[in-house]
Image (cartoon, rainbow, N blue to C red):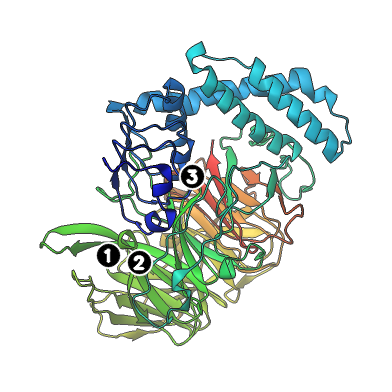
Amino acid sequence: SKLQLKTGDLDPRLFSRLRHLQKLDLSDNLLDRFPNSLTLPDLRVLNCNNNKLEDVTALKQFPLLEELTYENNVYLTLNDDYKVMFLLQNLRLLNGKDITKLANHVRRVNSRKLTSKVTAHWEKFFRDQLPEKYTAEQVKSIKKKFLQSVQTNVVYGPSSLSEFTRWRVKMIAEEFLACSLGVELNSDTEPEEKTDENEEESTESPREAAEDVAQVGDFSSYISNVTVTPSKRKRNHSKSSPGNKRSKSQASTEEEAEDVSAEPLHFLQCHSKGNSREDFKTQLWSCVFEPVLDSGARKDPIVSSSRTVATCGGESVCLIDCETGTVLKKYKVATEEFFSVAWTTLTMVISDSRKKAHNILAAAGRRGIVKLIHVAADFCYGEIKAHKKPIATVCFSPTQETHLFTASYDKRIALWDIGIPDCDYNFKASQLLVLETASIPLRIALVPTCPEQYLLAGCEDGCFAWNIKLDKGQKSRPFEAIFQFPDDESMTTSHRVDGLAFLNDDVVVSKSSKPGCIYLWSWSRSFDAKGKGCQRTMSAVILAELEWSTTDMSYLTLSTCPAKEYVFCGDEKGSVWMYNLSSYTPAWGSPKGKRSERRISPTQILKWPELRVNGEQPPEILVNNVVADPAFTYLVVLTSVNITAIWKKS
């Protein structure tokens, strides 16, 4: 403050290095605007009092901003207050006043009213002007006329806010045209590619710093030149043609009974090899939502569930804010291909002997090494050379914060104690158990009622269970049970299980190589703990079958949202099959719970939108993984074409 600074004095090359800056005071200067690329990813408090600011829209580059003051900037008006309330989703205090309620009204009610007025204006005056088969030139012409007309004629709220209303109407109208006509949006700033300073670093160093990805304008880290036209869904779920179009407002299926509707929010291309925009080959494999810390820096004051998700694929791990589509952090190892990520919360001692909870991310893949990343510090503090062959999946114990399971192509599942790093990040990891598998383990799940006693694994050649209780002396253990499932005519143990998760404390959801079928079965009724000896064959007590794609494509995994009793599974056409099972679970939980006779159809199928990249549709799109946050607000879809799609439940 008080340095006679002008806009040109704010050097983006300097400011973009201030990754952890949370509070910035620029008061009493001569700033007339903000440069677009200051890139302060963690900025929470900004003071711009007594400057010469003329525009506030560049402040959208600080998505985590909570407190903002810009009093005594004579050119700023009430319209600018409304703009920042709309652009900054986390803003609580504006010029010293709590604006939470008003901001919610601006973002939701105001937006809803304006959207309906814009849509009505199109329907009444413009829809019939467009012929059935239209050229790009005709679209361009009608777009120009519509944007002029809608900004002049759509009026809402007091006249003192007319500038804000025009600004929002233009934005909504452009989004509407993009969805209904496939007209590409023009962002104010070109997406910039991040240059990786650490690209040349030795990949063996245990201290590889996580990278922040620069966010420039609305569309950075997004696929460049994208057109999205979501496609219409019909109740006939088994096979539907991908060619139909629909408007964005028709996101739910046509039956009113459907209880879920989701809108496509963001399409990100943030795992590209060498940051290439042409990379539509990198496979994305795993994503998991960050746990909410009681007093964590990234805890959102509005959203009770975390909206930050870690994703992995290719050489990188990304942290994404699902609401804004911002890539908050990116961590890269040039020679790695990451297959799995998992979170834990460690209570660490910080320098002055105080204890504080921090979220730690474990990431592993082709090299058989687990990287441990302290996310808030942007610091990969260590690694565990866990296996000599690739690691397919990792997961932490829900009860022992330092216990990590790693399942590898060496046909072993290892349990590690990763220890707790001290204030200098020294830590000691030790191997506690090795579980021998008959074939490669693909998915693992701890039994919710006894997570310290039993582990289930879906493998290349069946579904197995181990006793993992640590008071038994034996460190290397064979499996205790193998489960058999109905085949076409008989029961079989021999099948690939590439999807495995618990829906609740007892119901297991598993997907095997039997086409078109996902099984739900009871853990407690299938596993006989009283029997003696190892490697016993047990019949899975089937509760129901879910109807799914008839593809024979493997490794398209499933997930569950236990709090909402949902199962999700993607298919070979980019669609997500969603099953709401809340009406079935009470019967399955009763002692004499009967099997559901008919296959359960999906509640809804989210079709992959007609998404064009540089004017062309991407090739075959497989959904490798799909995960909802615990409250089922967001749905993150990972594909085989280096696209992360984020849907929001509406």
Image quadrant in which the N terminus is located = top left
Helix or strand or loop: what does disc 1 sit on? Answer: loop
Spatial CA span between label 2 and label 1: 7 Å
Q: Residue at x 48, y 48 (%)?
A: 322
Q: Amino acid at mark 1?
A: Glu
Q: Quadrant of residue 485?
A: bottom right
Q: Earlier in the sequence, mark 3 or mark 2?
A: 3
Q: Quadrant of residue 384?
A: bottom left
Give the residue at the far top of this rendering. 158
For discs 3 and 1, the disc positioned in front in the rendered view: 3
Compared to residue 625, the image places residue 491 above or below, namely below
Residue 435 location (% of width, % of height): 39, 81
- Few, some or many residues within 10 Å of mark 3 (<14, 14–19, 20+): some
Judged left or right of residue 327, residue 149 is: right
Closer to us: 531 or 401: 401
Q: Amino acid at mark 3?
A: Thr
- Few, some or many residues within 10 Å of mark 1 (<14, 14–19, 20+): some
Judged left or right of residue 139, residue 516 is: left
Helix or strand or loop: what does disc 3 sit on? Answer: loop
Q: Amino acid at mark 2?
A: Phe
Compared to residue 92, the image places residue 223 above or below, namely below
Residue 236 location (% of width, % of height): 74, 43
Q: Residue at x 34, y 56 (%)?
A: 18
Residue holding disc 2: 396
Report if the CB atoms under discs 3 and 2 are less than 8 Å apart.
no
